[in-house]
Amino acid sequence: MTVTTLHTPSHREALWELESAFDRGDLITVFGECSVEYEGRAASTLGLGNRLLVLKPDGSALVHTDEKRTPVNWQPPGSTHHAAVRDGRLRVRSERTSPDETLTVRFTAVHQLSAMGVTGGRDLEVTGSEADLRRRILEDPDLVEPGFEPTAVERDSAAGPMDVFGVDASGTAVVLELKRRRVGPSAVSQLARYVDAVAEEPDRDPDAAVRGILVAPSITDRAAELLADRGFEHVALEPPEPETPGAETKATDSAEAAEPKAETTEPEEPKAETTEPEAETLGTETASDDDEPIEADAPEPSGSASRESQQ
C-alpha cells in the first residue's frame, strides 16, 4: 500500500496530486478551509470553514465537519471527480448525471492532502495495470492505429515522462497517455500538458503537428468534449486479462486424467510345488493419481509543501 501526504501545499501542487490520485484510483482526503455548494434536486451552500473532504474511487464524495458521524453533504457512488484551480482557489467538483447533481468544494487553503492506495475490498477485482497495457501496445502497435510506430517509453519532457511516444504512418509525432480504467477530464489535461511540452521543445519545427491520443477502456462525456476541443483522440483499449496462477497446471492435470491408462500386469512369480491347486494370477490395474484432479487455488512538486510517502 502506498500513502502520499502533502502538508500545506499550494493550490497547484494539490491539483497535481489530485489528478495523479484520480488516475491511480486512490482514496483521497483533503482537509482545509473551504466553502461548499450543492446543486441538483435542491440547492445548499456552506460558508467558509475548516472541513474534511473524502473522495473515494467508486465516485463517492463526503464532506465532514467536527460533529456527528454523517457528512454535511455528499455524492453517491458513480459520481465523477474533477479538480481545477480557479480564481485563486482549488476547486474540487463531484458530478452525477442521473439525476443531474453537482457538489462543488472550493478551498481557499489546503492544510493537508492524503492519497492512499486501499486494497482488500469485498468485491476486489484483479485487473491489468498500465504497464500491461503499454506492453500490449508495444507488442501490437496497430491496436492504436495502423502504421503507428512507438519510438520511446517514459520519454522525458518539460511536463514529465510520457507513457508512450511515437510517430504515425505519415511521420507525425504522437503522444499516448495510457489509463487502465474509465477516466475523466483530468486525464485529458494530463495528455494536453505532454503534447504542449513536446510542441514547445526548442529543436522542433514550430509548425510541426503533435497528435495526442488517450488510450483507456472508456471516458466520460466531458472528457470526450475536451478531447474534441483540443483535436485529440480516444482509443478504447483495455489491459490484457491477468493470468491465473495454477491454470496451466490444472489444465495439464485434467488432460492427463482424460488419457486412458494402459492396463499393466505384474509378472507371475514362481510358485512352490503344492498339492493344492494354484490360484489364478490376475493382472492389477495401476491406480491413477488423476482420479480426483486437485483444484489450484485462485490468486487471489516543490514549494512550501512537504511530502511524505510510505510504501
Image: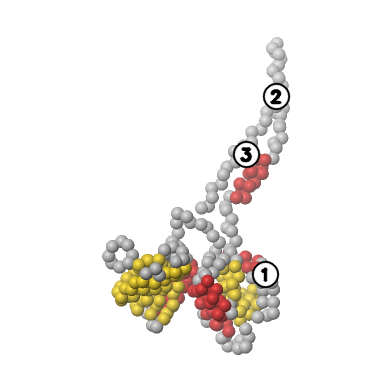
Kind of residue indicated by mark 3: Asp
Residue furthest left as drawn: 67
Circle 2 crowding by C-alpha within 10 Å: few under 14, some 14–19, many from 20: few
Quadrant occupied by the C terminus: bottom left
Residue furthest front as drawn: 41
Q: Is residue 2 visible?
A: no
The label shown at residue 142 is 1
Check disc 2 and report the residue beneath it: 282
User: Element at badge 1?
Assistant: helix
Give how far across and how far down residue 297 sits, in percent. 54, 48
Q: Is residue 95 left or right of residue 141?
A: left
Which circle's residue, 1 or 3, is located before the other in the chain? 1
Residue contact at pointers 1 and 2, CB within 8 angstroms: no
Q: Is residue 171 above or below residue 3?
A: below
Which residue is drawn at the image coordinates 54% and 79% (left, top)? 192
Give the spatial CA distance, label 1 vs label 2. Answer: 64 Å
Q: Closer to the camera, 269 or 179?
A: 179
How many numbered tags mark residues here? 3
Which residue is drawn at the image coordinates 57% and 44% (left, top)? 295
Circle 1 crowding by C-alpha within 10 Å: few under 14, some 14–19, many from 20: few
Which residue is drawn at the image coordinates 61% and 81% (left, top)? 210
Kind of residue indicated by mark 2: Leu
Give the spatial CA distance, label 1 vs label 3. Answer: 44 Å
Q: Quadrant of residue 170?
A: bottom right
Kind of residue indicated by mark 1: Asp
Q: Closer to the camera, 249 or 14?
A: 14
- Select label 1 or label 2 by which is in front: 1
Check disc 3 and report the residue beneath it: 290
Q: Closer to the camera, 237 or 160?
A: 237
User: Element at badge 2?
Assistant: loop
Give how far across and how far down residue 250 sits, in percent. 61, 46
